[in-house]
Amino acid sequence: MGRVTERRRVIRVRNGTTGVRPDTLVAEEPLEVRLDGKPLAITMRTPGDDFALAVGFLVSEGVLASAADVQAVTYCEGAAEDGTNTYNVVNVRLAPGVPLPDVTLERNVYTTSSCGLCGKASLDAVRTATRFPLPPAAGDGARIPVELLGRLPDRLREAQKVFDRTGGLHAAGLFTRDGELLDIREDVGRHNAVDKIVGRALRAGRLPLSDTVLLVSGRASFELVQKAAMAGIPVLAAVSAPSSLAVDLALESGMTLVGFLRGGNMNIYAGEDRLDLGAEEDPAAAEPARAG
C-alpha cells in the first residue's frame, strides 16, 4: 500500500546559504474507484483510508445510504501490467437489491486533488434526494455559540499530524456541537478528506451525521457543500472563502455555511439560525462582507 509521505532531494536556500538535504513530501497517487467491477472515477489522493474514500464518494453520488448497501470493498489484484497489486484500484460491490447507477463513459471521469466530481448525477442527487434531510435550525436554547465555532480551527490544526511533517495537506474535521473532535482526515484534496470522513461514518453505521459540524481547511466549494448535505451534516465551516454556488446550495438545502473562520472572526453565509451570535448586530455588517 502506498505511503502517506515520501522523501525527495531538495536544494534549500536560506539567508544566502545553499545546502542539499532530503525533504518529506506528502504522497499523491491516483485511485480508481470501480462499482461492481465497472470503472467509475479516478481521483488523485493521499494513500490511506482508501475504502472509506471510495464509499464516501459513493454517498455523495447518491449511490449509498448505509453500511447495509455495501457487500464488500476490496483492492483489485492484478491491476498492474505484471499482475501485481498496486493498491490504487478499489472495487465496491453493492449488496443485493441495491440499484446500480448508470455507469457510462460520461461518468467515468478523472478528478484532480483540488476539485471533486461535479456531474449531473451528483447535482441531481443533492437537489432532489432526501435520504438525509438536514435537521431544521435549532431553537435558542440549542444554538452553537460562535465563540465555540471560532476555536475549532486551532483544534483541527493541532490534530494534523502529517501536515506538521509536510506542510502540504488539507484536512477535514468532524466535531460535535460541543466542539469535541470526532474524526479528522488529511489528504492532498479537501474533497477526498471529506469523503474519507463520510465513508468512515457510513462503514461504522453512523449516517446521517445530523448533530455534527464539519470544518475544512481552505475554501468551501460546491462539492464540499454537496458532500456534507448528502451525509446529513447541518453545519459546514471553512477557514477560507466559499464559492457563489456553494452559498446557493447551502441556502437551498438548509445548511449553515460559515467562511473565513479565523479565531473570533467569520462570515456566515447561510443558516445563521443554528448559531448563537452572542452580540447585537453591528451597523457596519450591513455593508458587503469582505475577507479582511
Image (tube, rainbow, N blue to C red):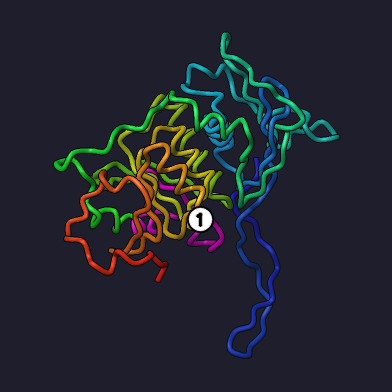
- 86 or 156: nearer the viewer: 156
Quadrant position of the C terminus in the picture: bottom left
Does the magenta run of residues contain 225? no
Question: Quick check: 88 left or right of 170?
Answer: right
Quadrant position of the N terminus in the picture: top right
Query: Would you place residue 269 above or below residue 195 in this image?
Result: below
Question: Quick check: 173 left or right of 177?
Answer: right
Residue 100 spot, x, y in % from top left: 63, 17
Extent of the magenta region: 153-174
Which element type, helix, strand or loop, lies under badge 1? helix
In the orientation shown, which residue stands out farthest toward the bottom? Answer: 16
In the orientation shown, which residue stands out farthest toward the right? Answer: 81
- 90 or 108: nearer the viewer: 108
In the orientation shown, which residue stands out farthest toward the top? Answer: 97
Question: Quick check: 201 left or right of 48?
Answer: left
Determine the residue positioned at 67% across, 39% down: 31
Query: Counting other residues with Cα less than 10 Å from the Cα at mark 1, is it few (<14), some (14-19), or many (20 or more)?
Result: many
Query: Would you place residue 20 above or below residue 231 in this image?
Result: below
Residue 57 spot, x, y in % from top left: 56, 34
Residue for badge 1: 162
- 279 or 144: nearer the viewer: 279
Residue 42 spot, x, y in % from top left: 69, 39
Determine the residue positioned at 57% across, 9% down: 97
Does the magenta run of residues contain 165? yes
Query: Would you place residue 127 above or below residue 259 in this image?
Result: above
The number of callouts visible is 1
Determine the residue positioned at 39% across, 46% down: 236
Determine the residue positioned at 66% across, 48% down: 112
Q: Amino acid at mark 1?
A: Val
